[in-house]
Image: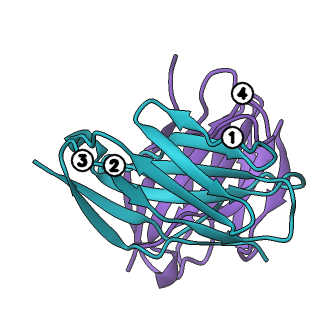
Amino acid sequence: ETGVTQSPTHLIKTRGQQVTLRCSSQSGHNTVSWYQQALGQGPQFIFQYYREEENGRGNFPPRFSGLQFPNYSSELNVNALELDDSALYLCASSLDRGPISPLHFGNGTRLTVT
Amino acid sequence: AQTVTQSQPEMSVQEAETVTLSCTYDTSESNYYLFWYKQPPSRQMILVIRQEAYKQQNATENRFSVNFQKAAKSFSLKISDSQLGDTAMYFCAFMPPSGTYKYIFGTGTRLKVLA
């Protein structure tokens, strides 16, 4: 069984640029969640996608957007990058969107904004 | 708003000893879910143990067990017979019972197991 894979593993961008992070969910999982983990902090919920529809959003501005594709892979897009966007971005997939289905996390994408 | 607090930024334990990591949370919900996740240097978050609030019995998974005190809103993790591979960041997380099934994480406890 293939786990959750994220690409790229590391990325350096300049303030004001745009970035796209990618996530391939675990086989059979229809739900993908994205989290931002700043250095020394716990992950913070960005949004969740269930069967290609956004299923909830955390306290992040609209320049954070996402997509889920028919194969349930997902993208996180961030426009107009700011220095505070520097963080580890974690993608997690689950069999379903409820609490019974545990999250399976990828290894994350480390984004550095200079 | 729901919050999760981990008051121990760092802890260390000798190999084969027992260690307890603390977590408190705040919520007005009566039913919810609590989790402990482990994040080793590889960065991948791994589920350690889960507890449903409506279950009075404390969850156990091999060497890992929890002490769930609902009235005190406390959810501590006990690791018995600590192993070097247990060295990691440990995050306590809360999930509300409905709506957006998002995790609310604490700030983590860095655990180092000493040989």
Q: Are marks 3 and 1 on the same chain?
A: yes
Kindly identify which residue carries mark 3. B17
Is residue B83 positioned above or below B74 on the image?
above
Subunit bearing disc 4: A
Mark 4 to mark 1: distance in Å?
39 Å
Q: Secondary structure at mark 4?
A: loop
Quarter holding the C terminus of chain A is bottom left
Subunit bearing disc 3: B
Kindly identify which residue carries mark 2. B40
Kindly identify which residue carries mark 4. A71
Q: Secondary structure at mark 3?
A: loop
Marks 2,1: beta carbons within 8 A: no
In which quadrant of the rendered view does residue B109 lie?
bottom left
Tint of chain B: cyan
Kindly identify which residue carries mark 1. B57
Q: Nearer the viewer, residue B111 or A101?
A: B111
Mark 3 to mark 1: distance in Å?
24 Å
How crowded pointer 1 is (Cα within 10 Å; few <14, some 14-19, many 20+) is rated as few
Mark 4 to mark 2: distance in Å?
29 Å
Disc assigned to residue A10: none
Q: Secondary structure at mark 2?
A: loop
Marks 3,1: beta carbons within 8 A: no
First in sequence: mark 3 vs mark 1: 3
How crowded pointer 3 is (Cα within 10 Å; few <14, some 14-19, many 20+) is rated as few
Q: Are marks 4 and 1 on the same chain?
A: no
Q: Is residue B93 left or right of residue B107?
A: right
Q: Looking at numbered disc 1 in the image, what kind of residue is underneath it?
A: Gln
Q: Looking at numbered disc 3 in the image, what kind of residue is underneath it?
A: Glu
Residue plotted at (48% across, 52% down)? B77
Marks 3,2: beta carbons within 8 A: no
